[in-house]
Amino acid sequence: MTKELRISIGSGLACVAVLLLIFAPGCTKVPNGGVPIYLQVDSPSVAYDGGAFGSPGFRIPDAWVESGATDLGAYEMPIRVPILAQGDVSILISAGIYDNGIISSRASYPFYRSDTFTIHNAVPGQVYTRHPVYHYFANTQHGILENFNSSTSFDSHMSISNEDADSLPGLPLHSGQIVMGTNDTMTVCLQANGTTVNTNGREAYVEMNFKKSNTNENMPFDVGLAATDGTGTISYYPLITIFPQTSWKKTYLNFSSFIGNNAGSSFKIYYVVYKNPGITGTVYFDNVKLLYFN
């Protein structure tokens, strides 16, 4: 069964579990007389935390929920989760993402600390609402943290634009842009300087915001990493092709395996933008981060 299917039927299964507990034989006392409390989860956010990990822009469609030691599963928000518990009920909610932007590949994002809280004196049948707030783990490393506010770490194919993905108070309204002229059909843009990363087998992701300018033209782009090892040998790894829209989107790209297999190399993000001739267009990028644990 796919993760997507489990998410779609998770709420129904939880309700069936409640009914089974109510009518199951035996002497075990069912909490709340079999009447659950309900946890409503929606409208998540990511804390800015002084900009230590760049912009808090996010895309969090799912919630992974635990109550005490019980894993209640993953759900697409908004969701109302029945919980058979009483008294003080401890809750943990983790941020669920589309891994590599793929809706059918759902994952709990490893760099966001789970939102934890306690419902005190829980009342059977009562609905408790939670808007999760996530923070980056303090030990998150950022090999790349590019906001394009004053300059760009990419080569000359990337320039600064007045477009902006976040419009946060106190921050300049800038992003990076790759401009495609009338006769351009492909542009390759690579970071000017690499960053050495060693994850010791742990996770590594690229986060970024993106959009395109032209509604009349498909402008897909590849996202990849280039790894230069100690001998100067370069390995290129194109992870995914993205088809941007004219509104800002956010994605989380899982480079854990590639970086782990090239541990200690110097890594650069690169983009390859494609376009048909005869029309101009621009692809914008913002809040580009290479995050990892070591």
Image (cartoon, rainbow, N blue to C red):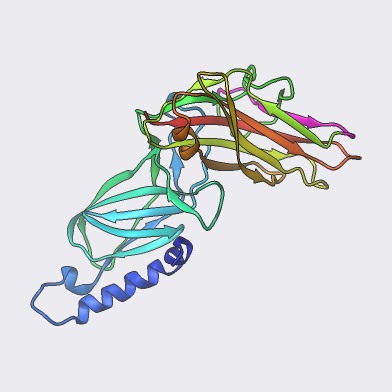
Q: Farthest residue in the left direction?
A: 27
Q: Residue 188: name its quadrant.
A: top right
User: Does residue 25 appear left or right of residue 289 in this picture?
Assistant: left
Give the magenta range: 170-183
In front of the other: 271 or 22 = 271
Q: Is residue 45 magenta?
A: no
How far from the left and from the top, in percent, is residue 65?
33, 55
How far from the left and from the top, in percent, is residue 169?
55, 27
State which quarter of the image contains the C terminus: top left
User: Does residue 114 appear left or right of residue 172 in this picture?
Assistant: left
In front of the other: 175 or 257 = 257
Which residue is drawn at the image coordinates 69% and 20% (left, top)? 155
How far from the left and from the top, in percent, is residue 267?
54, 25
Q: Residue 185: name its quadrant.
A: top right
Which residue is drawn at the image coordinates 42% and 70% (left, top)? 9
Tell me if I can see residue 167 in this picture: no
Q: Is residue 40 above or below residue 153?
A: below
Q: Is residue 289 above or below residue 61?
A: above
Which residue is drawn at the image coordinates 21% and 54% (left, top)? 69
